[in-house]
Image (tube, grey):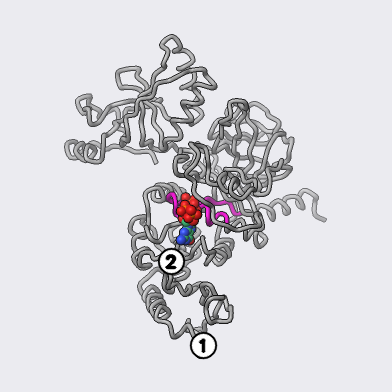
Amino acid sequence: MKQPIDNHSTKLKKEVDTRRTFAIISHPDAGKTTITEQLLLFGGAIRQAGTVKGKKSGKFAKSDWMEIEKQRGISVTSSVLQFDYSGKRINILDTPGHKDFSEDTYRTLMAVDSAVMVVDSSKGIEEQTKKLFQVCRMRGIPIFTFMNKLDRDGRDPLDLIAELEEVLEIDAYPMNWPMGMGKGLMGLYDVYNNRIEVHRPEENSLDGERFVPLNEDGEIEGDHPIKQSSVYEQAMEEALLLKEAGNEFSREAIAAGELTPVFFGSALTNFGVQTFLEAFVDFAPAPSAHKSVEGEDIEPHNETFSGFIFKIQANMNPAHRDRIAFLRICSGEFDRGIDVTLARTGKSIRLSNSTQFMAEERETVQKAVAGDIIGLYDTGTFQIGDTIHEGKNEIQFEPLPQFTPEMFMRVEAKNVMKQKSFHKGIQQLVQEGTIQMYKGYHTEDYIIGAVGQLQFEVFQYRMLNEYNSEINMTPMGNRIARWIDPDVLDINMASSRNLLVRDRFDNPLFLFENEFALRWFNDKYPDVELQTLL
Ligand code: G4P
């Protein structure tokens, strides 16, 4: 007879295996919000479709999803959405862009098992997509591509695929192929499902037929109005070309993040989105193991609850000092009121006040399992990268990577008499991961670095509100940060074009004015190897 504990572990494994936790990466305006809304519709998490109108209002901390919330009158929190589809529980993590882009955006990618890359097919691969992609690539997680806005005249699909492969250095496999685009969009040749998906079937003379099946040779049987169309011919020819010259389809390569399946479609007109979602649910991985600092794999089915904090969201309302710490559950099951250990301090904490983020309403979580994200109310206990775990066996997950900042400011206390609160504020906010800090190589001048403007604003706000420290920030603009081995460093290498500073661990680095200054340095010191973070 089976022990009850076995039943429990079988149940846990079953639950965990239904989880699909991913983030959508894209350049602003590629259609991330629109596709998110469509996905929520399919999941029944929202009931009404509509265009999400301009996001021009508001200064900061206005995530795209908060915008959906405002527009649609539904309660969507800014960080995690959860819905069920086809027997799977889907968690979508927000990766804020625009003015909200920050290190948190990168760190969120540490908490997902796969990523969906949304590309505007009239633009191709843009800057922010490239950066976010690189973080996903480094983790080796599967990346699914959605080439959006097919209802508009965009670039040649063959060009888009070639650019994707070249710029991102990843193999691509088109799962479907457009038959025309813009006003002339007739449909998609769905290579994977061997059928044609008809665009606006009700407007075609196809009796509302949404899918037209193909025979073994990938052709439409008998007479069919689609066959008369020139875009059909062209799509078939191009698809054949890809079959002969393109990459082989491979589930393993997709799982290893070496091949990205590409889906064409239009989020706005909801064309190709469901086909994409179905394939995604089929291919996207369930939660996998996370490495501890000792190199041990912590399996998601392991019954001991554990996880790590990847993001802390400070409340921007001065009346509420509370924050929410976002925890990715890596193993076991969360039960409200569970006692855990905070690995950094060894202290025991009872997790009673936690929220989970549902599209309909913010609910208090009773239960969540590996793969899920929970928000823990935080009054200053947690830091980014913290591990928490149940039981006596010490677990410490690998630290989160640091990302190379690109924007810099000089910072000083407005009031020279208030140095103490200024230093304390900086130290703590740097430790929390709000911002990165540097000092002049021979001076005590503070320079702060960030990947997005929002970080500076949050830093300034929190310095004032939490540490009562008014600060002056002087922009230094964008710089390219490169670390240098202290043993090869020669003070004379520094100039006004490559400012020499040290990070908070006293490691030296240069802040190059631009690419040109970096190249000049490399030419002058060909034997000096410079390092970058991610
Ligand atoms: P983001 O979250 O990635 O920043 O993009 P978002 O979904 O907000 O979309 C950016 C703009 O692109 C929106 O237009 C949206 O309607 C439009 N869009 C998204 N998907 C498609 C698509 O498949 N086809 C077309 N033609 N447009 C698409 P906007 O001008 O910001 O707002 P609106 O005033 O047009 O609604």
Query: Circle 1 is placed at which residue position?
Result: 221
Q: Residue at x 52, y 66 (%)?
A: 271
Looking at the image, is 236 positioned above or below residue 302? below
Query: Circle 2 is placed at which residue position?
Result: 173
Horizontal and vertical percent position of residue 414: 41, 16
Q: Amino acid at mark 2?
A: Tyr
10 Å crowding of disc 2: few (<14), some (14-19), many (20+) = many
Q: Quadrant of residue 386?
A: top right
10 Å crowding of disc 1: few (<14), some (14-19), many (20+) = few
Q: Amino acid at mark 1?
A: Glu
Looking at the image, is 134 positioned above or below residue 276? above
Magenta residues span 20-37
Of tags 1 and 2, which is closer to the observer? Answer: 1
Does the rendering let one see residue 145? no
Q: Quadrant of the N terminus?
A: bottom right
Query: Relative to 36, is 494 on the left or the right?
Result: left
Q: Furthest residue to the bottom?
A: 222
